[in-house]
Amino acid sequence: MSFYITTPIYYVNAEPHLGHAYTTIAADVLARHMRQRGEDVFFLTGTDEHGEPVADAAHAQGLEPKELADRNAERFKVLMPQLNASNDFFIRTTDPQHEAKVQEVLQLVHDNGHTYKGTYEGWYCPRCADFKVENEILDGNRCPIHEIELTREREENWFFRLSTFQEALEKLYADQPDFVMPPRHFNEARSFISQGLQDVSLSRARLKWGVTVPWDPDHVFYVWFDALLNYVTALSYAQPGEDLTDRFWPATYHIIGKDILKFHTVFWPALLMAAELELPRHVFVHGFLLGGDGRKMSKSLGNVLDPFEVIDEYGTDALRFYLMRDVAYGSDGAVGMDAVRARYDAELANEYGNLASRTTAMIERYRDGVVPAAAPEIELDELSSDVAALMDRAEPTQALELIWQQVRRLNRYVEEQAPWKLAAAEDPRLDSVLATLARSLRTLTELLAPYMPVTTTKLLEVLDADRLTALRPLFPKRK
Ligand code: MSP
């Protein structure tokens, strides 16, 4: 079956930070897991390059928007291999093919009668590039996300008739309780809809940095419409000479942070309906990584933790493991170097790393590297299906917890069976104990591969060799 997974496309007004890495890693873990299950996977990420936030940031630095976009898009592009993200394509919304496709799709929306010209007046956050509705606004007319003062904007715009999709969206939410997950966010989206939808701006007249509205070239499309469409446009040109749309659309999972819920769970399905396109199967919403001060990590709050620093010190696998393990997926969680270090030492070096090196060392020492053919005493068959069921619900943290319980169980098993004593006594049961360890370790390592692709690949090579050789520590103990 085909499986299409996306990350949000990242704004190029700032450099990549740990929040971006987190979304990417979560999507990558799911993509790798699905590839292991034999699905036909397409994994998309990229950069969101138009709109006011980028234009403003560029002008503040004395640059043209495209110069800033080129510079920062490159930073996001190189982040992907550093995170070991296995994305199949990297879209930039300044790609001419994307721009042409956006015009084509939105022209159809216009031809289908879902647009009109009108005057918009409202409270606007230039960092979100979003008009806020009354019940979102903080005291003192401030943005609920950036906490900066909103500006009063009045402009002649093209509008998208979002309000006419009220019933269709209500029906979608009634029919598909797993359209948005986890349920807390499903309810949030549903209640946003039930409060009554207002039409939204589809174009900006003053702004020049965007995709030109083909039927009114003095306007550019509002950046969110251009951006959301990346999920569809990418498929048409990601593979030179081949259109992948029929093979992969509709998307299986859109992975997003909770700050962009409204766009993906309300605007996006309505826009797709207007464009006569199928709707994605699921939108999976994750929480925020919080800085040490307990607030959202964001450049404007100045509490950003640099993913490159974490990678330099601990390695990519440790970063991936830490983020998937320490922050319950779907909830908010504080992150910091001390916690990375603690997980690394206690779990990667001591628990998993030790299990792997003890197992390989004992098989080498006692059985000359050959895994005995004896029947194992522990079967982990159910674990794989439980993990798969959790991944289907986008619960990578819980899946990792299940795997980890078995890592611990096997370490207890080693202590209880004390293979060194069985060896000293030349007890034939040593064969089944070593077979149990080798096979279970292999299963666990396969299940861990989506989380820690580098280390597990090395270990699987050792475990699959005709003769195991004792491992050097997988995760060297830190001084
Ligand atoms: N460009 C839009 C998305 C358009 S998708 C059609 C955007 N970009 S962003 O760069 O600001 O954020 C991208 C993603 O990173 C969002 O899902 C956001 O939630 C996530 N994160 C940014 N900071 C974050 C944390 N501190 N913690 C976790 N994720 C957060 O929004």
Image (cartoon, rainbow, N blue to C red):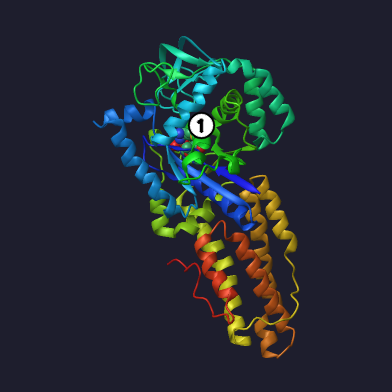
Q: Which residue is at a point 61% across and 25% down the rendered structure image?
A: 273
Q: Is residue 249 left or right of residue 440?
A: left
Label 1, secondary structure: give it. helix
Image side of residue 71 versus residue 310, left or right = left
Q: Is residue 13 above or below residue 400?
A: above
Q: Residue at x 39, y 18 (%)?
A: 219
Q: Is residue 125 above or below residue 421?
A: above
Near-viewer residue (166 or 131): 166
301 or 68, nearer to the observer: 68
Outermost residue toward the front in this view: 241
Q: Position of residue 294 (x, y in %)?
A: 49, 38
418 in relation to 131, above or below: below
Tell me the amino acid under the disc marked 1: Leu
Point out the image quarter for the C terminus. bottom left
Q: Quadrant of residue 270?
A: top right
Q: Is mark 1 within 8 Å of ligand 1?
A: yes
Asked whether the viewer can see residue 468, the reply is yes
Task: Pick the residue in front: 334 or 125.
Answer: 125
* Left or right, 452 with reference to 371: left
* Position of residue 302 measured from the top left corner of the image (x, y, whole percent): 38, 37
Q: Residue furthest top?
A: 119
Image quadrant where residue 364 sits: bottom right
Residue at screen point 42% across, 36% down: 97
Q: What x and y, as percent, mark residue 339? A: 50, 53
Q: Which residue is mark 1?
A: 228
Asked if residue 93 can be seen in this view, the reply is no
Q: Residues within 10 Å of mark 1 (few under 14, many from 20)?
A: many
From the top left corner, tell me how far across and down residue 155 is, in percent.
Answer: 41, 11
